[in-house]
Structure formats: C-alpha cells, structure tokens
Image: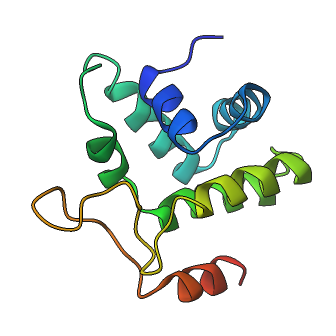
C-alpha cells in the first residue's frame, strides 16, 4: 500500500509503531467521512514536497483536528479500540499545555493552532 511521505513523517514524530501507523492509514483510506478524506487528501498534496519541515506539516493540522479525525474513525468503527487509544495517547504526548504542538516554535515560526488549553481540548474531544 502506498502511503504519502508526509504521513510517515507525522507518524514517526508522534512515535507510532509501524503496525499502529499502518492501521491508522488503512482506516483513513477506508473512511468515507469528510474529515478523514480532507486530511488524507491534504497529506497526498504534500507528496511532491519532501523537504517540508516537520513544524510546517504540524502547523497545517491542530491537535484538535487530528483528534477529531480519530474520533470520526472511532465512531465509524474503522479503528480497533486498542489502536485508537494508542494513537490518541501518542498524539496527546506531542501536545503542550495550551493545546498546541510541542514541536512548533513558540515565536518566529508558524503560528500554532491552539485550543483554549489541553484540558478543554480533551474534554471537548470526549463529548
């Protein structure tokens, strides 16, 4: 199965294992949801630009958007519960206390897309 390099770069940065990354990609490919399709298509659009820094990739999707896609896949039963929880935990470990990506520079770099705070992001996610 062909996978966009941007996806590989993100999953490596999030610390996902190869099986976790594979299961997540398979769920994204199989999903008919708009959120998953939008994310999947955006990852493919990065295909011709392998020099894009990780911070630039992360700035395109907030942690909240990634969690929303994961929740969509959960609701559609596209991901096993175990894989979903493992991926969520890996993603949340990359989020700072303000709900933005830790890998994004605080100043002088791309503006992080942040929720009000991490607790609010998690609380809203689980609603």
Q: Residue furthest left?
A: 108
Residue located at (15% from left, 56% from top):
109
Query: In the picture provided, is 50 more to the left or to the right than 108?
Result: right
Image height of 72 relative to 45, above or below = below
The chosen color scheme is rainbow
User: Image check: 43 left or right of 119?
Assistant: left
Pick the quarter of the image with the C terminus: bottom right
> Toward the viewer: 35 or 12?
12
Q: Position of residue 15 (x, y in %)?
A: 62, 41
Left or right: residue 10 compared with residue 54? right
Front residue (pair 73, 64): 64
Residue 45, by quadrant, is top left
Q: Viewer-proximal residue, 30 or 15?
A: 15
At 55% across and 88% down in the image, what residue appears? Answer: 120
Quadrant into which the N terminus falls = top right
**Percent position (x, y) of residue 18?**
72, 25
Compared with 91, 106 (above or below) is below
Quarter-wise, where is residue 2 in the image? top right
Q: Position of residue 52 (x, y in %)?
A: 25, 30
**Residue at 82% over, 45% down:** 79
**In the rendered image, the vertical position of residue 112 relative to residue 124, given as above or below:** above
Residue at 46% across, 44% down: 38
- Report the label total: 0
Q: 88 or 126, which lies in front? A: 88
């Amino acid at each position: 199965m062909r996978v966009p390099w941007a996806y590989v770069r993100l999953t490596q940065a999030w610390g996902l294992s190869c099986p976790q990354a594979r299961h997540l990609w398979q769920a994204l490919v199989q999903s008919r949801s708009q959120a998953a399709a939008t994310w999947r298509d955006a990852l493919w659009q990065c295909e011709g630009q392998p020099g894009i820094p990780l911070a630039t990739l992360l700035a395109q999707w907030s942690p909240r958007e990634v969690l929303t896609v994961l929740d969509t896949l959960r609701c559609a039963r596209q991901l096993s519960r175990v894989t979903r929880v493992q991926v969520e935990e890996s993603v949340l470990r990359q989020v700072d206390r303000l709900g933005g990506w830790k890998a994004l520079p605080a100043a002088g770099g791309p503006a992080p897309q942040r929720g009000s705070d991490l607790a609010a992001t998690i609380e809203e996610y689980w609603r």
